[in-house]
Image: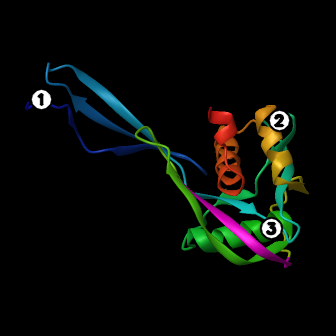
Amino acid sequence: MNKKRVKIGEYKTVFSGIIFKIKQAKAVFPSGKLKTFEQSIRPISVTIMAIDNKGRLLLTREYRPKYKRYLWRLPAGRVEKNESPLKAAQRELREETGFKARKIKLFHFSDMGQSLDWKRYTYLATELKPAPLVGDEDEDITVMPTPIKKVFRMVLEGKIQSMDMAYLILKLYNQKYGLKKFIN
């Protein structure tokens, strides 16, 4: 079956801010109807699942102005210009936890999709050694090494509210312990 498709013109930037860039393109549907498609582009980001020598996941308690309270988080941040995601992960880990990983490998990759262009790399970091870097002045972060089983319970209880971070924790827990008893 040869179905007619929408024809999308070239995306043009209509707004460029500090973090986000908004692009729009004109689209023509097979019926002749016109519509504007829009994309929000955000810089590539990294998240780090750092596990200390006692097998605990390094969670952070971060004050988030939008929510006017502290939230449970994983170390994370943006990839700077001319920086690879791997280098950004090591830098963010050092800035937010004070540790550098001797072993670090890609754990998960996601791309948010059509209307939000946001590539995110998650790294699993182990064999940590102290190597602090000065973090961003506006960040209020406390490192909380937490057993993985407890972090899993925090996800199930809704204490970790970030859906993407909850997913990453469930994936880590499944690799380490399995989720079979929860699926049946």
N-term mark: 2 or 1? 1
- How busy is the neighbourhood of tag 3: few (under 14 within 10 Å), some, or many (20 plus)? many
* Residue named by callout 1: 3
Tell me if residue 102 can be seen: yes
Q: Which mark is residue 95?
A: 3
User: Decide: marks 3, 2 in contact (CB < 8 A)?
Assistant: no
In the image, what residue type sits under mark 2? Answer: Lys
Q: Residue at x 80, y 67 (%)?
A: 95
**Left or right: residue 23 compared with residue 92:** left
**Left or right: residue 50 compared with residue 109:** right
* Residue named by callout 2: 159
In the image, what residue type sits under mark 3? Answer: Glu
Residues in magenta, as a range: 120-131
Question: Magenta stretch: dominant SS?
Answer: strand
Q: Say if the magenta span includes residue 130.
A: yes
Q: Nearer the viewer, mark 1 or mark 3?
A: 1
In the image, what residue type sits under mark 1? Answer: Lys
- How busy is the neighbourhood of tag 2: few (under 14 within 10 Å), some, or many (20 plus)? some
